[in-house]
Image (cartoon, rainbow, N blue to C red):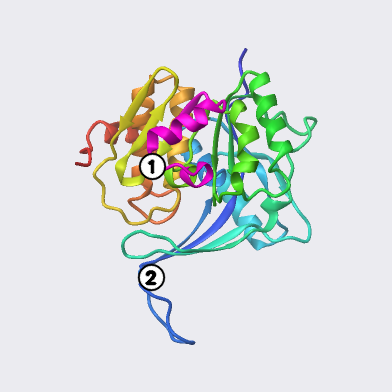
């Protein structure tokens, strides 16, 4: 059966205000100068849905913004990249979720986050839009979706699978307590894609293979652990694949995980084999690190394929 969208991306959508390089915050009321400043739409859903759109697949974005000037920027930017925003809600009396990121010279990104609208939204009713009319359904941002986290997210993923969608998932800001939210989701996740650090925090294990096995044993069908400069580890009941990172010049690591998610989503839509899928997700993630902001570096699908086949692997 033909689906209206290639992917629905639901969850955390944030306005990022990024500046670089920031070696230190000036003392008192003093002034310091930086080389670059950007506003971008980011978050484990926002960054992912824009990257998916840039990679040429049809996308439905589902989330919430406030009733402020930041909301206008978020919605207009999503639409500029071709994202269908009918699944968005503008919430009265709250601010759009936003983050200030001071990017260090080595690419690290200490953040100041305003939780805002993402804590208050629920998916639109089916009369407005059918969020499950897609090939791949991505839930991104568990842990910072106060109203959505918990039983609502379980039902969303369960329904997505029932409707024949491939379900993909990622979170943000994991703590030991986050595991209580995440555990009920696991049987309904086809591709579980957190960072190794977040996955480790939630399960209390350190060895990557042990961590992957922990989540597979609890119902995840495919576990993909992103490991920064070490690449990624993929495991399911049949395979274990380690995919090395590409040798790139890191400017800013903001949005690398979101771009990896987008790369995997697009690879699944295009029915790439698993080795190629992982390599494609690795190049989309790596390209984002070459510039400032969560959508940096990604031009289009063909450019990513070209760079995937030409960039050197990190030793």
Residue on which the image places disc 1: 285
Residue drawn at 60 percent across, 53 percent down: 74
Count of numbered circles in the view:
2
Which sits in the foreground, 246 or 315? 315
Rendered location of residue 28, percent (x, y):
48, 87
Residue drawn at 50 percent across, 37 percent down: 53
Q: Quadrant of the N terminus?
A: top right
Query: Residue 55, can we see it?
Result: no
What numbered label is drawn on residue 162? none
Does residue 205 show up magenta in the picture?
A: yes
Q: Is residue 289 left or right of residue 211?
A: left
Q: Which residues are magenta?
A: 200-223
Residue on which the image places disc 2: 22
Which sits in the foreground, 184 or 130? 184
Rendered location of residue 72, percent (x, y):
64, 56
In the rendered image, which quarter is residue 107 located in?
bottom left
Does residue 72 show up magenta in the picture?
A: no
Which sits in the foreground, 172 or 104? 172
Label 1 vs 2, first from the N-terminus: 2
């Amino acid at each position: 059966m033909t689906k209206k969208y290639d992917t629905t991306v639901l969850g955390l959508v944030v306005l990022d205000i990024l500046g670089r390089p920031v070696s230190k915050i000036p003392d008192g009321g003093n002034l310091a100068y930086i080389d670059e400043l950007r506003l971008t739409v980011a978050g484990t859903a926002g960054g992912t849905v824009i990257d998916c759109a840039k990679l040429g697949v049809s996308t439905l974005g589902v989330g919430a913004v406030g009733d402020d000037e930041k909301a206008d920027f978020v919605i207009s930017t999503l639409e500029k990249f071709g994202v269908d925003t009918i699944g968005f809600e503008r919430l009265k009396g709250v601010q759009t979720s936003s983050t200030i990121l001071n990017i260090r010279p080595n690419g690290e990104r200490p953040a100041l986050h305003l939780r805002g609208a993402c804590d208050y939204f629920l998916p639109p009713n089916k009369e407005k839009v059918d969020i499950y009319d897609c090939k791949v359904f991505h839930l991104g941002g568990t842990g910072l979706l106060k109203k959505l986290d918990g039983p609502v997210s379980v039902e969303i993923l369960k329904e997505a699978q029932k409707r024949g969608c491939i379900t993909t998932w990622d979170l943000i800001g994991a703590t030991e307590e986050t595991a209580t939210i995440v555990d009920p989701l696991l049987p309904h996740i086809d591709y579980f894609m957190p960072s190794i650090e977040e996955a480790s925090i939630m399960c209390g294990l350190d060895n990557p293979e042990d961590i992957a096995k922990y989540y597979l044993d609890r119902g995840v069908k495919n576990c993909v652990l992103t490991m920064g400069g070490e690449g990624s580890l993929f495991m399911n009941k049949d395979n274990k694949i380690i995919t090395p990172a590409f040798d790139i010049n890191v400017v800013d690591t903001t949005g690398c995980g979101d771009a990896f998610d987008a790369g995997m989503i697009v690879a699944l839509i295009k029915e790439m084999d698993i080795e190629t899928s992982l390599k494609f997700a690795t190049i989309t993630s790596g390209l984002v690190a070459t510039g400032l902001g969560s959508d940096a570096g990604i031009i289009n699908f063909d450019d990513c394929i070209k760079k995937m086949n030409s960039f050197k692997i990190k030793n």
